[in-house]
Image (cartoon, grey):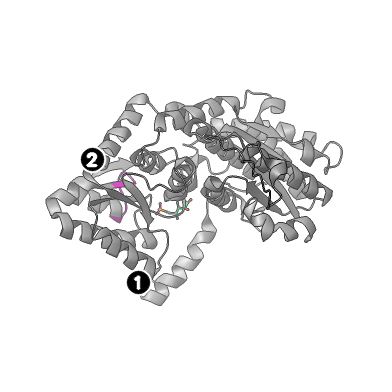
Amino acid sequence: MLTLDISKATQFLPQGAVQKYADSAIKAAKALEDGTCAGNDFLGWVKLPTDTTDQFIASVNECAQTLRQLCDTIVMAGIGGSYLGAKAVIEALSNSFQPLTPQILFAGNNIGEDYLYELCELLKTRRFGVINISKSGTTTETALAFRLLKKQCEQQRGKEEARKVIVAITDAHKGAARTTADKEGYTSFVIPDNVGGRFSVLTPVGLLPIACAGFDIAALVQGARDMEQATASTVPFEKNISAIYAVIRNAIYQNGKKIEILANYQPKLHFVAEWWKQLYGESEGKDGKGIFPASVDLTTDLHSMGQWIQDGERTIFETVLSVEQPEHELTVPTDDENLDGLNYLAGKRVDEVNKMAELGTQMAHIDGGVPNLRIVMPRLDAYNLGQLIYFFEKGCGISGLLLDVNPFDQPGVEAYKRNMFKLLGKPGY
Ligand code: PA5
């Protein structure tokens, strides 16, 4: 089971700071379950893991299997919550160097002309399929990429064959993605009305791409189910790790630390941090409040951001995401000449070196005045990622309510769109 160590954070807090929020955190967890809090029309994620049936998982796997058979490349078009969860899980579970078969590519998460051009060029040589993921069904970045991909897929395969390899994941009734899917007769999955984008990784938004990549979505959902139980409002505060995480970060924030840095020691976790930044940034950054979520990949970034973290403005705290057990074993070899002076490491696992880097960094950062939280995943597999996802989601809901914001809206993201539409001459703007 995932664990959370707060002992290196509480030492930075005044006496009683944690206890001050403990009751409110459990009340917030209860309000999320009962649907009595702000944003209660977007609480479908709370019981989603236990509500997800084996039959539903089988239907997602069946669709994935069809795409895997018919395609050598599958492009996921989506942005924000319709992209980051799937990307995070797929990257975390993939071999760092061997492309998956079929290869999974992402589009619709930027408007880079070169990116799209190069993608379209690559796809000319591929038997590709497309998954169009958009809850609103009108997001410009995704719609633009999908227009290009749909056309190219139809040109390469013919309209009839293209229909078999284009899938839509969108609202049940509204939006252009739904209209297109219904008109063209695409296989489609529904994003539940009451699940917001950044909380949607355990809906088909995340499950279908992850299944297309060949990973075990049943294990992912099972991990989330177990964490749903472990963080229920009936679990006392002292054992409820999502409530504890929410309380500690709020207590630290109230004591002047405005930035949380999520640090990982596994390159494969880079996109988990990107997903986490969206989850917490969009949920809490409003009404002139909110911790700024940042991230570093360590030890890589100790050679770039390490100086700032150690010695810069003391407005930060750090949450370390640590994986206990690597999936592979690699030992440092002995070298008779020892020209590099590394024989003191000979015989040690590479992971032991990594763990000592982690411990040494934590000690240094604590000395430098950076409160430290540590989340430990026993392994980097689908089951533990399911736990991690739900742990962060529940922590986010509780944390936002403690901060007294509506964690489930995102009014701020409309501002750039209005300007962009006006500048581009979209009718009605
Ligand atoms: O969390 C959110 O709601 C957003 O990040 C959305 O996921 C993102 O804007 C994409 O929206 P849509 O799925 O409607 O295309």
SS at circle 2: helix
- In the image, what residue occupies the spot 27% across and 59% down? 123
Residue to which mark 1 is pinned = 426
Under tag 1, what secondary structure? loop
**In the picture shown, does residue 244 fall above or below 423?**
above
Circle 1 crowding by C-alpha within 10 Å: few under 14, some 14–19, many from 20: few
Most foreground residue, 309 or 148: 309
Q: Which residues are magenta?
A: 168-176
Q: Is residue 50 left or right of residue 254?
A: left
Q: In what quadrant of the picture does the C terminus appear?
A: bottom left
Q: Earlier in the sequence, mark 2 or mark 1?
A: 2
Quarter of the image for residue 151 reads bottom left
Residue under the point 54% across and 51% down:
274
The amino acid beneath tag 1 is Lys
> Is 173 inside the magenta-drawn segment?
yes
- The residue that disc 2 covers is 69
Mark 2 → mark 1, Cα distance in angstroms: 40 Å
In which quarter of the view is residue 334 placed?
top right
